[in-house]
Amino acid sequence: MRRLGSVQQKISCVFLTEVKNEPSTKREYQKFRVLATETLNPKVLESDIQSAVPTEKLDGTCCYVSAYKGKPYLWARLDKKPNKQTEKRFKTFQHSTKGSEGKAFVWNVKEDFRSVPESWIFAHGVTQCNGYPQPDENGHIPGWVPVENDNKQYCWHSSVVNYEIGAALVLRPHTEHQELLEITTVPLHELLEQTLELIGTNINANPYGLGSKKQPIHLLVSHGVLEIQSAPAVNYQQLLGWFQGCEEGKVEGIVWHCSDGTLIKLHRHHLGLRWPVEDPFLNSRPVLVNVDVTQYECDFIPKSLFTTFSEFNGRQFDHLKDICFE
């Protein structure tokens, strides 16, 4: 098996965290909450977070672009998870004395996990033992599966790529006017080895209000392209105030991109703040549609996102949620 994913260390929270024995506001099935303390995580200082680039954390599903069948392909996130019997044993262990003492659960990687497609590959950075990928602290093995057009499970992923023309529908800041967003087609080869976020109508309850049930809208956003212009100092109280009182703070979270490749995250939930919020910052920015399918020699599927956006080519909207094809 080969590995995908850029070489990056990921720190889950900029602050040290503590576990509260109360139901999570983020995940209904989770019986505990993870909250940030006011103590900065020592690891972030090693990565010089003060010089890092703060970017908006988007609420979608992670994707990846890499080669498959000899050409650039979009890959969807698919974690390899324990089967029901093993999951039950794992949860029992977590709540046992051994689990509370920090002892390791013993996995049989060949037998303990649910089957995945043959094309599945584990992500870069996953620990290996004797050539086999090992699960993380949650019992999952992060990985990827290629998005093929005939797989209905990934129909929303498929809607933003066209392998015949080798392009994807992408949302990004306009190259000349950074306050303006742009929806455009980008060659997949220009996105090779990048991770992106798929957002839209049928992703995570659609916090950005994109499209409708009758005419869904989905877009890819490269990680790190939405830089935060007025991010506060890396201080608990200042960050809390920014999330609560600043227009630009109406985001799911912040991801700092450090010069050594480390990614450091802070989620609103870490601060006890709710998400989603009304009128998220992404919807406050104007957006220009720059999609012209006439430049391609291709028979596009009728009413595909590519052809539909092409009908709005050159049109500017005040907000993303204002785009309506009905």
Image: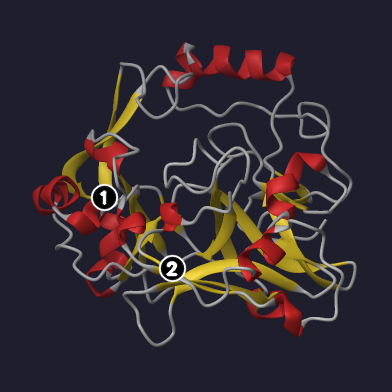
Marker disc for residue 224: 2
Which residue position is annotated with label 1? 250
Which of the 4 image quadrants contains residue 270?
top left
Quadrant for residue 235, please give it: bottom left
Amino acid type for the residue under numbered disc 1: Lys
Q: Which mark is residue 42?
A: none
Q: Position of residue 23 (x, y in %)?
A: 35, 17
> Is disc 1 surrounded by few (<14), some (14 to 19) or many (20+) residues within 10 Å?
many
Mark 2: few, some, or many residues within 10 Å (few <14, many ≥20)? many
Q: Give the x, y percent position of residue 51.
A: 25, 75
Q: Looking at the image, which residue is at 63% across and 40% down?
A: 214
Q: Residue at the spot x=38%, y=77% of the render?
A: 259
Depth check: give the residue in front, 272 or 143.
272
Q: Quadrant of the N terminus?
A: bottom right
134 up-or-down from 232: above or below = above
Report whether residue 153 is seen.
yes
Residue 252 position within the rendered picture, expressed as x and y whole percent measured from the top left? 35, 47
* Residue drawn at the location 51% of the way across and 38% of the way down: 204
Q: CA distance from mark 2 to mark 1?
A: 17 Å
Q: Is residue 210 left or right of residue 52?
A: right
Where is residue 199? Give x, y as percent. 53, 51
**In the displayed image of the protein, which residue is found farthest to the front?**
326
Q: Is residue 267 left or right of residue 198?
A: left
> Which mark is first along the chain, 1 or 2?
2
Do the CB atoms of the residues marked 2 and 1 lie less than 8 Å apart? no
The amino acid marked with disc number 2 is: Gly
Residue appearing at x 30%, y 47% in the figure: 279
